[in-house]
Amino acid sequence: PGPSGLVYVSDHSTCRVQVLTKEGQYVRTIGVTRQPGSGNHQLTSPYGVCVEPGPSGLVYVSDYDNHRVQVLTKEGQYVRTLGVTNQQDSGNHQFSNPGGVCVEPGLDGLLYVADRFNHRVQVLTKEGEYVRTIGVTGQAGEGNHQLCEPYGLGVDPAPGGHVYVADTEHHRVQVLTKGGAYVRTIGQHGAGN
């Protein structure tokens, strides 16, 4: 849930984010339904959505096929773009099909973006300045600090909390420190418990 208990739902195939009450009542739409685009108020295959805790309540949306993260007000007004629209690349603060996004609370909280086809998580300031990379850019790997097509992620906001990364192609969740050091692996390839 975001500010005022609203729920923000990424509606990937209809190019929008739906905003609902906790009871499921429609509030508004971010993006233009069934009209993909690369303008400031348009989305193409949005995936991850994260609402910044606190009074600003900025909404971060990974715009998967536009290779960017859109930053919007909780009312859906455009604030800024992180990454370069329609430019799939591997430089710092550039993306190749971003998936999950997560922002830490507080004034100095950081933004974590699962940068899928660059096989990394990028850590940025909320304004978009590059801080560090978790994983090895452009190199998929099975090692403890390597990722292969990370898609979803979560960040424990507690001091000393961890980053949880859905390492899609390795069928595992990598648990890392916020600095990127390996902690443990959850799961493995297969259908067991």
Image: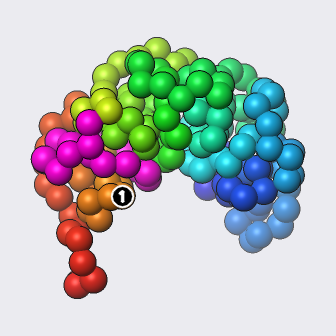
Residue 18 can be seen in this image: no
Q: Can you give x and y, in whole percent of width and height, for residue 90 in the image? A: 42, 25
Image quarter (top left, top right, bottom left or bottom right) of the C terminus: bottom left
Task: Tell me the magenta residue range.
Answer: 139-161
- Answer with left or right where residue 63 lies relative to residue 136: right
Across and down, in percent, residue 181 comes to 15, 37
Residue drawn at x 54%, y 29% is 88
The quarter in which the N terminus is drawn is bottom right
The type of residue carrying mark 1 is Thr
How many C-alpha atoms fall within 10 Å of the one at disc 1: few (<14), some, or many (≥20)?
some
Residue at horizontal 59 percent and vertical 25 percent from the top: 87
SS class, disc 1: helix
Q: Is residue 185 visible?
A: yes
Q: Mark 1 = which residue?
A: 168
Residue 154 horizontal side relative to residue 142, left or right: right
Q: Is residue 61 left or right of residue 132?
A: right
Is residue 182 highlighted in magenta? no
Query: Quick one: 122 or 76, which is closer to the camera?
Result: 122
Specify the quadrant of the image occupied by residue 53.
top right
**Residue furthest out toward the bottom:** 192
- The image shows a total of numbered marks equal to 1
Image vertical order of residue 82 relative to residue 156, above or below: above
Q: Residue at x 86, y 46 (%)?
A: 35
User: Residue 42: horizontal and vertical position, in percent?
Assistant: 80, 36
